[in-house]
Image (cartoon, coloured by chain):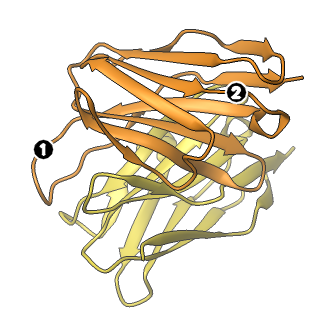
Chain colours: A orange, B yellow
Amino acid sequence: DVKVTQSSRYLVKRTGEKVFLECVQDMDHENMFWYRQDPGLGLRLIYFSYDVKMKEKGDIPEGYSVSREKKERFSLILESASTNQTSMYLCASSLWLGQGASTEAFFGQGTRLTVV
Amino acid sequence: AQSVTQLGSHVSVSEGALVLLRCNYSSSVPPYLFWYVQYPNQGLQLLLKYTSAATLVKGINGFEAEFKKSETSFHLTKPSAHMSDAAEYFCALDSSASKIIFGSGTRLSIRP
């Protein structure tokens, strides 16, 4: 079974803090993703990575950065947390099958972040 | 631009009734399409996926979806709803760049 593990289920942070959300996958997947989920908005892509040290902006990258130093680990960083970043954060990974092919993403359990 | 639209943020059906969750997509290339389910306080789990092999796709828990290119639709159905089907359902599209784009979700409620 593919396992995607997010380091925390619940986090409470103060405005202005630097926040790290960690994600580890155990299936040697090339692609990794960070989404945030808000009611009525579905999942919105923040960043994704298709290889070590490679990253691309998603639809809502402002206020976030990412790090992928090892293939199995993809970190999301909130440089200076703000209350509008209170949300559910979901990490996912998928296998790269080559150009034009596709496979499903596997998700972690999510981290519910509250910024006060 | 590629996009996914789910019609109806909330659907309520009686136990034993037909479940129909609607999804329309926009894509400039032949799409790969997915339905995911999310139970409360959980991550997303794959229900089924369309990868062009067959237009009618069967998934887990009795769900199926039909790809209709002419209607740009990928609606999810289940003949008989069960109480355990209550969850949020997401339709998703895999763009050619391996980015997976999600719809806004449909919350399914089951009435006893």
Instruction: Give above or below for A5 relative to B111.
Output: above
Of the pair B9 and A55, the residue shown nearer to us: A55
Q: Secondary structure at mark 2?
A: loop
Q: Residue at x 83, y 17 (%)?
A: A14
Provide the residue designation for mark 2.
A80
Where the N terminus of chain A falls, by quadrant? top left
Which chain hosts label 1? A
Q: Residue at x 62, y 27 (%)?
A: A79
Q: Is residue A4 visible?
A: no
Instruction: Give above or below for B99 relative to A97.
Output: below
Residue B44 position by quadrant: top right
Pointer 1 local density, CA inside 10 Å: few below 14, some 14–19, many at least 20: few
Provide the residue designation for mark 1.
A97
User: What percent of the width, then of the height, locates residue B87?
Assistant: 70, 41
User: What percent of the width, then of the height, locates residue B49?
Assistant: 35, 52
Q: Residue at x 61, y 24 (%)?
A: A110
Instruction: Give above or below for B19 relative to A25.
Output: below
- The amino acid type of the residue labelled 2 equals Ser
- The amino acid type of the residue labelled 1 equals Leu
